[in-house]
Amino acid sequence: MQIDEHISKNFSTLKFCSILMVFFGHFFSKSIPLAWVPVTVGLLIFSFSSGFFTAIKYSGPFSKKEFWKRKIKRLGINLFVINIILLVLFLVQDRPGILSWHTLVNIFGLNGFLNWFFIQNMSPYGNGMWFFTLLLIFYMVYPLLAKMGRKGIVVITLLWIGIAYYLSLNFGYGHALWLTSCGFIAGVCAGKTDFPISPGTSRKIAALCLAVMLALNVLFQNKIFNFFFILIFSISFLHMSFDLKVPEKLFPVFAFFSTCLLEIYLFHTYFFVHVTTVLPVDFIISVLIVLFLSKVSSFVSTLIVNIIEGD
């Protein structure tokens, strides 16, 4: 499968919208009962996109050295700058635990292991970092997935979804770890096999999943299958966007912020401001602050990379 400019634009738009969904869900988590749903869908869009584009970008001869060189350059410098900006914030706030060994774990993006081994994080770093840890694990596993043929990746994807569902029922961590992990491998599967259905059919599947899930949850208080409904809805939602057209006037805004999605995600929970008595207004102010800082952070990271490369 090839990625044309149209699909690339749509994914950029969806990823930016999804980070706002995650932002929205976390900001209103205490005031809106189902705020976790947009957060989960947003994370699935991110993980699926990562798997999808990775599978297509590295579909030819695979070099582990070149693969990790690109990832370190793209993520390592960005994470370094993010950590510096957060350090300034923590020093201004006089936050405790900055010098703990947990900080060392967090600044390398490995906070997920603290969560998953039930180690209480004593450092101010680490909010949302479990997703970054999961992303690193995916990159470590991808060379194995890259060697698989179409049938093999389909079998592995279905097998992992079943395992992840079981783990989600028995090993909960307070965040959508297992569901999000399915997004990565499902994205690789989609990139290697192409979608067997049309975007129009995906729209119908997404609507049906949403309707059935709401009916089961509201009428019967049955949440046991939410894992599958959210997974299928999120993937169908992404696929149905393939033939949609982003308004040309809006796309420059999405493209402008598409380079700092990691920054937005890792910054957003640290900059929830409550300066008014109106939550939506506080939300908008928080978003503007995070967008500004994220763009600055991304600009500095790009500048450092260009200096290193001698551009």
Image (cartoon, grey):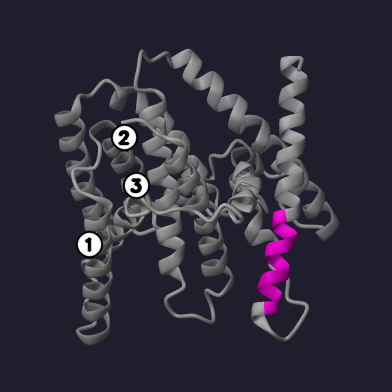
Q: CA distance from mark 2 to mark 1?
A: 20 Å
At label 3, the amino acid type is Gly
Q: Residue at x 49, y 57 (%)?
A: 18
Q: CA distance from mark 3 to mark 1?
A: 17 Å
Which segment is the magenta one?
A: 281-291
Residue 156 in the image: x percent, y percent? 20, 36
198 in magenta: no
SS category of the residue bearing label 1: helix
Whether residues under marks 2 and 1 lie with C-beta atoms below 8 angstroms apart, the answer is no
**Position of residue 79 in the picture relative to residue 219 (left or right):** right
**Position of residue 304 in the picture relative to residue 170 (left or right):** right
SS category of the residue bearing label 3: helix
In the foreground, 205 or 55: 205
Q: Earlier in the sequence, mark 3 or mark 1?
A: 3
At label 2, the amino acid type is Gly
Decide whether the magenta segment is chiefly helix, strand or loop.
helix
Residue pointed to by mark 3: 183
Mark in the foreground, 3 or 1: 1
At label 1, the amino acid type is Ile
Residue 7 lies, with reference to residue 175, above or below; the image says above
In the foreground, 242 or 150: 242
Q: CA distance from mark 3 to mark 2?
A: 12 Å
SS category of the residue bearing label 2: helix
Of the numbered discs in the image, which one, if any, rests on residue 45?
none
Q: Earlier in the sequence, mark 2 or mark 1?
A: 2
290 in magenta: yes
